[in-house]
Image: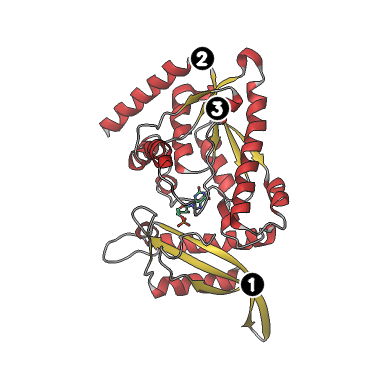
Amino acid sequence: DWIMRDHIAEAVEAIRQQVGDEEVILGLSGGVDSSVAAALIHRAIGDQLTCVFVDHGLLRLDEGDMVMDMFVGQLHAKVIRVDASELFLGKLAAVSDPEAKRKIIGGEFVTVFKQEAAKLTSQGAKGAKWLAQGTIYPDVIESGGAKSKKAVTIKSHHNVGGLPEQLGLKLLEPLRDLFKDEVRELGVALGLPPEMVYRHPFPGPGLGVRILGEVKKEYADLLRRADAIFIEELRNFVDKESGKTWYDLTSQAFTVFLPVKSVGVMGDGRTYDYVVALRAVQTSDFMTADWAELPYALLKKVSGRIINEVRGINRVTYDVSSKPPATIEWE
Ligand code: XMP
């Protein structure tokens, strides 16, 4: 629409004015905000933007390839993909406490990103001068206001505050005035696929907090395949009354890996394999949430497919806990 096109033209002009002919670095996570920021800045300054995509190995099935395909294949943006999965898995070995895992993942993320950024800034006059971030308006309010209140930290979300100063870079935040809905509209107008722009939120530590206890590659691989089936079927199942898919009728849905084994039977044999839990919630603010009353036919399809297609998982459960007292994620 016209309003959005005007907005893009204005935003593009503002970015060009701000950065001139200097180089910009942006940390791409695959999430909506950093993706839209990248697409907008790329529209404005093209190859003056270099995206750094740190793959911690805790992303969903094929997600890293999808990010590369979208930004390099389709937008022709410059993206440095850092495959740090072994590094992260190594640091996480034998760590089972949820907050300890979050700190390790957040900390390593910053370390790896800084190393890559340092390479890009250390090229003298031609080196990068700007760090772009996908900060949106609610983030601005949150970091300003909420600090004064003495809130109990249930889960520490890692944020990369202070990074521009540490890297000696100027901060570029082209989404600072926008609400989430506006960011999504902007993303679609910039040509990002609607399925990606309207995706459920995904936590920074990724599958690291969806594998209970110690994170292992074997667990992550099983979880990725099970979760892909769940998400695929949520996108397939349409609710007749509303005409919407169950993916769109839920605010967040995912699979959790439980590192316990249970007995099953397959053919003439006994199996002794892992368990997963399906989680789907409806919420407006993520502070409270109800478990979603998914149709039995959908649950049946998902469970049948996971057990038949993912060797190593022989039992699927559905989480019927609301928040509070449970949280949305299991860790
Ligand atoms: P909980 O589990 O606290 O989740 O009910 C509320 C929302 O926050 C997300 N979440 C995280 N996001 N880093 C993130 O970026 C984290 O460590 C983290 N933990 C929870 C969760 O996915 C849900 O949307």
From the viewer's perspective, tell me whether residue 274 is left or right of residue 40. right
Please give the residue where the numbered disc 1 appears in the rendered image.
Answer: 260
Q: Name the residue that disc number 3 marks.
A: 164
**First in sequence: mark 3 vs mark 1:** 3
- The answer to whether residue 303 of the structure is visible from this angle is yes
Which element type, helix, strand or loop, lies under badge 2? loop
Q: Is residue 173 above or below residue 313?
A: above
Q: Say above or below: 262 vs 189.
A: below
User: What x and y, as percent, mark residue 29?
Assistant: 54, 41
Q: Residues within 10 Å of mark 1 (few under 14, many from 20)?
A: few
Q: Which quarter of the picture shows residue 253?
A: bottom left
Quarter of the C terminus within the rendering: bottom right
Judge by depth and name the residue closer to the eye, 118 or 52: 118
Question: Could you classify mark 3 by the number of other residues whose Cα lies within 10 Å: few (under 14), some (14-19), or many (20 or more)?
Answer: some
Mark pair 3, 1: CA separation = 43 Å
Q: CA distance from mark 2 to mark 1?
A: 55 Å
Q: Vertically, is 241 above or below 107?
A: below
- Along the viewing direction, whichever of 120 and 165 lies nearer the viewer: 165
- Which residue is painted at 35% across and 58% down in the image? 283
Q: Residue furthest bottom?
A: 268
Side (left or right) of 199 relative to 310: left
Above or below: residue 290 compared with residue 30: below
**Quadrant location of the N terminus?**
top left
Report the residue marked by disc 2: 21
Q: Amino acid at mark 3?
A: Pro
What mark, if any, has residue 189 been given in the picture? none
**Residue at image coords 29%, 61%:** 243
Q: Which secondary structure, mark 1? A: strand
